[in-house]
Image (cartoon, grey):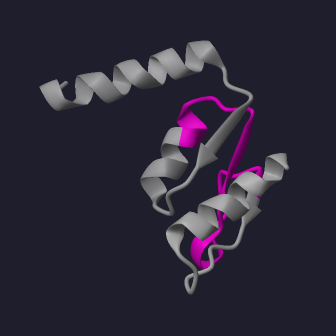
């Protein structure tokens, strides 16, 4: 294992022990999605950017015409 890989692996192990109820993925890349699934969140909320919602239990469409903060507010609207 390279030195740069040690920290992400350690963080994933800590997350899995924590077993969060929710993982909120504010990004739209595969990296966030993979970390959310590997992190062991029971529910995973995020953006179905480009129609891709794999790995998410709760997804909303990313509005490309809106500011990133506006999109994040919409996503966090799951909790009222």
Q: Nearer the viewer, residue 76 or 54?
A: 76
Is 79 on the left-hand or right-hand side of 44?
Answer: right
On the rendered structure, is 60 left or right of 31? right
Q: Quadrant of residue 60?
A: bottom right
- Foreground of the two, 22 or 5: 22
Task: Name the residue rendered at 65%, 68% in the picture.
Answer: 48
Asked if residue 54 is positioned above or below residue 42 in the image, the reply reads below
Q: Is residue 44 above or below residue 75?
A: above
Quadrant in which the N terminus appears: top left
Instruction: Give the percent coordinates (x, y) of residue 44.
Output: 69, 44
Residue at left offset 57%, top offset 20%: 16
Say whether residue 2 is visible: no
Q: Is residue 47 above or below residue 39?
A: below
31 vs 45, left or right, is left
**Residue 57 point in image, percent of width and height:** 77, 50
Residue 73 visible? The answer is yes
- Residue at the location (63% across, 45% down)? 24
Query: What is the x, y in percent for residue 78?
Result: 81, 52
Please give the name of the residue rendered at 47% of the width and 57% of the height, measured from the top-left corner.
30
78 drawn magenta: no
Numbered range of the magenta stretch: 36-58
């Amino acid at each position: 294992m390279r030195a740069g890989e040690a920290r992400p692996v350690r963080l994933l192990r800590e997350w899995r022990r924590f077993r969060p109820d929710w993982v909120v993925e504010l990004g739209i890349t595969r990296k966030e999605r993979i970390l959310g699934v590997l992190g062991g969140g029971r529910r995973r909320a995020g953006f179905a950017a480009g129609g891709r919602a794999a790995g998410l239990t709760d997804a909303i469409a990313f509005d490309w015409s809106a500011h990133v903060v506006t999109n994040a507010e919409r996503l966090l609207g799951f909790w009222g």
